[in-house]
Amino acid sequence: MGQALGCIQVDQSTVAIRETFGKFDEVLEPGCHCLPWCLGSQVAGQLSLRVQQLDVRCETKTKDNVFVNVVASVQYRALAEKASDAFYKLSNTRSQIQAYVFDVIRASVPKLDLDATFEQKNDIAKAVEEELEKAMSHYGYEIVQTLIVDIEPDEHVKRAMNEINAAARLRLAANEKAEAEKILQIKRAEGEAESKYLAGLGIARQRQAIVDGLRDSVLAFSENVPGTSSKDVMDMVLVTQYFDTMKEIGASSKTNSVFIPHGPGAVKDIASQIREGLLQANATM
């Protein structure tokens, strides 16, 4: 109805291309415009100025001969001041952008190893954006953003990469476990050494206490009983300890002691041997 009356409405974020007798006349901005069709004026078409997105999937191979699917997302829009170029110069904008994306990706990815491809995907996206910006600016389009949204290796390659990662993590776990066991063994050895050291100190103090007690007993007995010597007192102490030991052995129902034929008279010889051993030890020190 509006065209019959010579009027046309152009929506927001859209421009219309006006022709007069088939020749480009002007770009109509959003709003209402008079279009005298009787004078040969007509709308050749409309062009959206909104940002559009094109996802491009490109198959290529890396430097280490791994085939990957690279998915690039290109955001673009037509420029209002170059609307005539965007409308007339390209018949299929999306196919043109896709061709440039294929060209740049297949020129960039084969120079990189698979790991480097994942690490440098921003560089690949930047290269694609620069090439598209340079090419599409002549056709009235602006490249807003270019992203490499996905890099998909072959399924067998992904499985192998996961196995390599799992093996590396298992090796790290084994090293940590071995290190933990090593620390436990070191701490256990240090504890045993400290325990033996403290046990040695206890035995040394026990023996020192026994020696001090025997010395005090000998001195006290010699002072209180006239005519006795230190030798007599030591003999008596040894005999007393001997009978105490025999009493303890006899009181135990489960003993592994082996008895050698002897008599109480042999205690004197044992005392002599002990004294000689102590004297030799003192002489050595």
Image (tube, rainbow, N blue to C red):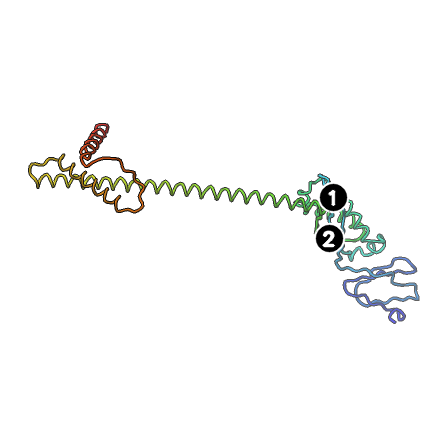
Residue at the far front: name it: 261
Q: Which residue is mark 1?
A: 67
Tell me the element at label 2. strand
Amino acid type assigned to the residue bearing label 1 in the image: Phe
Which of the 4 quarters of the picture holds residue 81? bottom right
Which dot marks residue 73?
A: 2
Ranked by sequence position, the earlier of labels 2 and 1 is 1
How far across and how far down the image is residue 133, in percent? 75, 49
**Residue 275 vs residue 208, the one in the foreground:** 275
Looking at the image, which residue is at 37% across and 42% down? 192
Q: Judging from the image, what secondary structure is the residue with disc 1 in?
A: strand
Tags 2 and 1 touching, CB below 8 Å: no
Q: Quadrant of the C terminus?
A: top left
On screen, residue 8 above or below 256 = below
Q: Residue furthest left?
A: 226
Q: Quadrant of the N terminus?
A: bottom right
